Image (cartoon, rainbow, N blue to C red):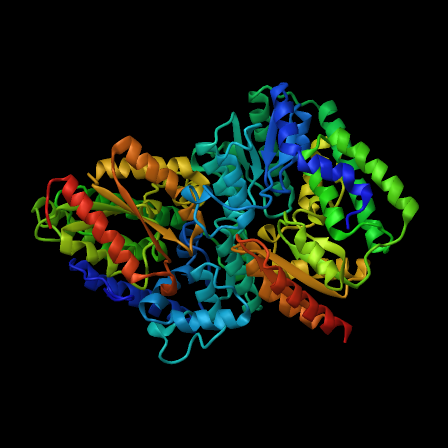
Amino acid sequence: MEKTRKSKKRLNAAKELTRVVADYYLECNAAKREGKPIGWMPPMNGAIELFYAMDLQPVFPENWSPVCAAFGLTPNNFAVAEKMGYSRDLCGYLRNITGYVHSNMNDEGVPLGGLPEPDMLLSPGAGCIPVMKIFHILERRFPHARVFRADLPQVAVEDIKEHHIAYAEYEIQRLIDFLAEATGRKLDYDRLKQVVVLSDQACALWDEIMSYRKYIPTPFSAAEIGIMFVMVTRQGTKEAVDFLTMVRDEVKEKALGGVGVVEEEKIRLFWDNIPLWYNMGLFNYFEKMGGVVVAETYSAAWSLRLDTENPIRALAMKSLMSYPLVSCVSVDKRKEMVLKACKDYSIDGAILHRNKSCVPITLGQMDIKRALEEELGIPSVIIDADHMDDQNFSVAQFETRVDAFMEMLLEKKGLVL
Amino acid sequence: MSSPLVKPFQENLSGYMERLEKLSGQGKKIIGYFCTYTPIELIHAAGFLPVRIMGGTGQIDTAYSLAPNFICPPLLLSLDKAMQGKYAFLSGVVQSYTCDVVCGLVNIWEENIGGEIYHSMALPYNDSPEGRRFYRASIQELITKLESIGGTITEASLRTSLELYTTIRNLILGLYSLRFQGRLPLSASDLHAVIQAGFVTPPQEYRTMLQHLLNQVRLDGTSIVEGVPLLISGSIIDDLLVMDIIEESGGCVVADDLCTGYRHFYPSCGRGDNALDCIIDRYSCRFPCPARTRAIERVPLLMDLAQRSGARGIAFIFQKFCTPHLSDFPILKEELGKAGMPNFHIELDAAGITEGQLRTRVQAFIEMLED
């Protein structure tokens, strides 16, 4: 296997996804030319729905990093960041976006036109430390951008209480006021409600799509997880709902028709932690042994349904819950989710990506590993890698571990290669 | 050579685990905390003893079975010690959310070590009236948890605990003040040992020890370390050897911006109509950790510390993999450079200090300052 490789996709929707991604970045750059205010923000919070409701352009530097990885821009971005003094021990997202914005970010030849410069920065006081530090770096890089210093309680999902929600609601309201003041655009609450309805529809579709993966054989694997793009960048839009509807229809047909990913699906796998964006082809590696990755932790972040009758509270809850659900803020909840998913998706084995670029998701993995084994008898294997930096990924080590793991799983099921 | 004045503190430090084990055996509930944002006054006011969890020095044996090797060594060492049963005297861990690793570690600790109370308190990042209302609600939530394990907090007990810790902080800041004036007859490692002892000594006893020490050092009134005045900045330092190396290499530590130093004590108290408001005010206005602020906002604070202490350069001492500090460093380096404040950085890893390399780097920096 190569160190960097694109995944082999089998869904027809994959072609449509290429268009959706290109359209989004074209839209971002067109917005700049047309004078539509552009705000850079972290993903997984309620700001995206506010932006679409106020006809503002949301841009996600975190989402740009996988694009950089896919197009091979990361080595240069890392080199620029390292030259500035950013340690190689820091998160790859931080180093990549720092390098990107401090080099020739909009040069001709930058894929998809690059990112348009921000008019506003929604700088989080929440989420993980690297994402906060990314925005501190961006504040300095784009001194003319208006900065909203967001603040959200970092609390485990199971511990959320009324005072956490009240503060998150206050922050959503404060953001609405900031956006109105910074852009001169007033929020139409009826429009917000429509956007929240669309956002919730996307979540419902997401859940439905994921539910078809419970079928044996599963209709698609983690190699297609790029469909998540619309959940990151398009939540609250008709584009997201239309795209997910198309995916749902295709996946449903395959699931009901018994069309799987490989000829004979022998082993069903679970993936914990962020994928290796520079090597999505890794998800195809298991296929030669009849293995398919049918579920992952990361996709759970997009399953949060929204209370459409109470948009502000819905956005507050979404902002509070998304990050803790997939990180060490909520180890208990995460463990519970992984165990449930492994049962629901008939998982034979789990692959735990020990991700040097993401400590918050990696911490707690060993407890999950033990629980999988003790409570469900599901074996797992640790893969040492990095979701952004291929220098922290050894192909040989991966192959050795995975081959042995797959052989063991096959033997356990009384199957052979 | 260590000053005889710090001997009682060193004795407390050397045998603290056995003493706390004994205290716990006598029925005293001891609650651990990692970070200086934890409102220890509340834990004490509830009738419990707050004790800071320290990694100390040594090899990491078992912690890698629960945590990855790319988190900072002090936290790995702490977990290692807990897994060996050395923190069995703790009834649990209470923590404020600061860095991601500490937050995750509290959950791992709860899952694997056991105890009756585990709590991560969410803090506001913005200091605003609404932020403080939220802070108050978070504190109330902690109070409820402390009461659920038998604690009782009243305005009077809170006031008493607040006064006790304010006195301690003032005494420590008194030592810092003498150090700024070049009148503290203690080396950097001696002062650090005095501070570390306070993390694991019952506060009434520690207050008395500090009062005695301050009376004695005031009588003495001369610095025993000669060298280029330096400010050291970083997170946790458990291994005192780092400071000895700096001072043996021609430096004199006159100030610090450490999690196990000045940041834990400054300011000594906050303002407010009642004890809770005073606590909230202090934690809202305290000398910030990089996990909770911007690099650019730390620059004037570091320059001010350097100015007050007479530091001519800053030595950044980072724990390997410490994201908050490592992320801030390029901006700090650039801005301090613009302000004419020379600086350099060293990283401490799990293998401990590479003494020769550290001495060479410190000596080179000091020679540069002397030129």
Can you say which quadrant of the picture contains the C terminus of chain B?
bottom right
Please determine whether, in this image, residue B159 is positioned above or below residue B335.
above
Residue B218 x/y as whole percent: 90, 45
> Could one spot residue B25 in this view of the protein?
yes
> Could one spot residue A243 in this view of the protein?
no
Residue under the point 24% across and 61% down: A281
Residue under the point 36% across and 64% down: A390
Residue under the point 74% across and 35% down: B165
Residue under the point 54% across and 71% down: A84
Say left or right for B273 vs B344: right
Say left or right for B358 vs A306: right
Please determine whether, in this image, residue B84 is positioned above or below residue B305.
above
Please determine whether, in this image, residue A347 is positioned above or below residue B338.
above
Query: Which is nearer the eye, A412 or B231?
Result: A412
Residue A331 x/y as whole percent: 41, 38
Query: Which is nearer the eye, B308 or A37?
Result: B308
